Image (cartoon, rainbow, N blue to C red):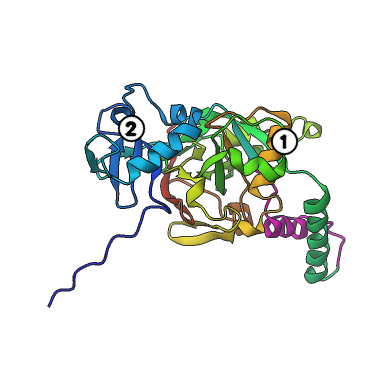
């Protein structure tokens, strides 16, 4: 007697997500994807051959309810054909104008760093040093500000694309992160209203070459994020943008990264020192956040430096966040010319 397989697991939370897809040898197009892996080409549904996901985010307040209606497959799409996701290439879901990145935003991660890189002469038990670091983190959350810097959109690649490790990158490392996708222009927004400016969420792996974070020639000038984080393909993004309305609490999602099948990062966004609303509000204090922009919220404990194992040719990274799907990328060493 054969047993019928159960339904395939949903790709993401909620009734739909946004994606940028392409057929073999075809141009990328904006798509509505349903959890059962069906696809609606939004160019046809919106009657705009040049439509992009960023274009939808530019008009998110009116586009979101229309997309919700389209996802119900009740004739709102005017009979536009839905096809299978299988066989289509999945690109990064959006081409942002700006990328805001964050560091030192997970409590346990920063405590680990504090203990590991503290004063060598401090001979107190590790428990005492961890307790001290925890007090510092509590004060930081209550009194201090997030640490935000700028990334380049040109570093973004698709969620299943190979990641080329540059020949100059001596210590390439992974950093899986929750990314908020902006849906309304935001400037100097208060924390209590910041999530109103978030259209949805996606997954980012914010790779870093640890060897070039600090300048060796001029250590007094501090970090060099251009060199260490912005090589082409150093930010695998996606696969989907899941609307904020489908994520009950962005500050209670599980962030998991596996390297060659072994769990390296596995933490809840509850552990963030500054939650999503504070990150968005803080970035908007200085910058004008635009629709489609990304606010990366930092990475939890468990990166390569913690494990003493950095990325190398052939490694496969599997990253997932609750309700947002999963990405898989393979590392490929740059071929010297």
**Does 19 sit left or right of 294 as displayed?**
left
Residue placed most toward the observer, 130 or 85: 85
Residue found 56% across the figure and 32% down from its top: 293
Residue 226: give x, y in percent of width and height.
63, 30
Q: Is residue 214 above or below residue 299?
A: above
Q: Is residue 113 visible?
A: yes
**Does 315 sit left or right of 103 as displayed?**
left
Residue 125: give x, y in percent of width and height.
82, 71
The residue wearing badge 1 is: 223
Residue 112 lies in the magenta stretch: yes
Per the rendered image, the range of residues in magenta is 102-123
Q: Nearer the viewer, mark 1 or mark 2?
A: 2
Q: Which mark is residue 42?
A: 2
Q: Is residue 266 above or below residue 66?
A: below
Q: Is residue 168 above or below residue 178?
A: above
Residue 232 lies in the magenta stretch: no
Residue placed most toward the observer, 205 or 272: 272
Query: Is the residue marked by circle 2 packed among few (<14), some (14-19), or many (20+) residues within 10 Å?
Result: many
**Does 65 sit left or right of 127 as displayed?**
left
Question: On the rendered image, what quadrant is the N terminus found in?
Answer: bottom left
At mark 1, the secondary structure is loop
Residue found 63% across the figure and 59% down from its top: 270
Query: Is the residue marked by circle 1 packed among few (<14), some (14-19), or many (20+) residues within 10 Å?
Result: some
Whichever of callouts 1 and 2 sits on the residue coming sooner in the sequence is 2
Residue found 69% across the figure and 28% down from its top: 287
Residue found 73% across the figure and 29% down from its top: 286
Residue 8: give x, y in percent of width and height.
29, 60
């Amino acid at each position: 007697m054969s047993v019928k397989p159960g339904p395939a697991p949903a790709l993401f939370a909620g009734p739909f997500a946004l994606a940028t897809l392409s057929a073999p040898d075809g141009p990328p197009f904006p798509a509505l994807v349903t959890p059962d892996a069906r696809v609606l080409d939004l160019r046809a549904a919106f009657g705009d051959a040049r439509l992009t996901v960023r274009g939808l985010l530019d008009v998110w307040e009116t586009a979101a309810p229309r997309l919700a209606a389209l996802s119900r497959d009740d004739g709102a799409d005017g009979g536009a054909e839905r096809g299978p996701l299988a066989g289509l290439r999945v690109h990064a879901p959006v081409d942002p104008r700006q990328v805001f990145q964050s560091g030192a935003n997970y409590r346990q991660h920063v405590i680990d760093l504090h203990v590991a890189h503290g004063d060598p002469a401090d001979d107190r038990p590790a428990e005492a040093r961890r307790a001290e670091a925890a007090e510092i983190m509590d004060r930081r959350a209550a009194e201090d500000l997030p640490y935000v810097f700028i990334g380049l959109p040109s570093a973004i690649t698709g969620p299943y694309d190979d990641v080329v490790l540059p020949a100059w990158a001596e210590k390439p490392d992974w950093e899986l992160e929750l990314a908020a996708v902006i849906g309304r222009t935001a400037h100097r927004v208060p924390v209590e209203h910041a999530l109103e400016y978030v259209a949805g969420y996606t997954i980012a792996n914010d790779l870093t070459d640890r060897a070039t974070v600090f300048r060796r020639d001029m250590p007094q000038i501090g970090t060099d994020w251009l060199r260490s984080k912005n090589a082409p393909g150093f930010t695998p993004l996606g696969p989907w943008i899941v609307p904020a309305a489908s994520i009950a609490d962005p500050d209670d999602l599980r962030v998991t990264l596996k390297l060659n099948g072994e769990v390296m990062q596995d933490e809840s966004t509850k552990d963030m020192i500054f939650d999503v609303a504070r990150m968005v509000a803080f970035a908007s204090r200085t910058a004008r956040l635009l629709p489609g922009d990304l606010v990366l919220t930092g990475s939890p404990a468990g990166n390569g430096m913690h494990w003493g194992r950095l990325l190398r040719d052939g490694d496969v990274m599997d990253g997932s966040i609750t309700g947002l799907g999963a990405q898989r990328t393979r590392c490929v060493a740059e071929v010297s010319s």
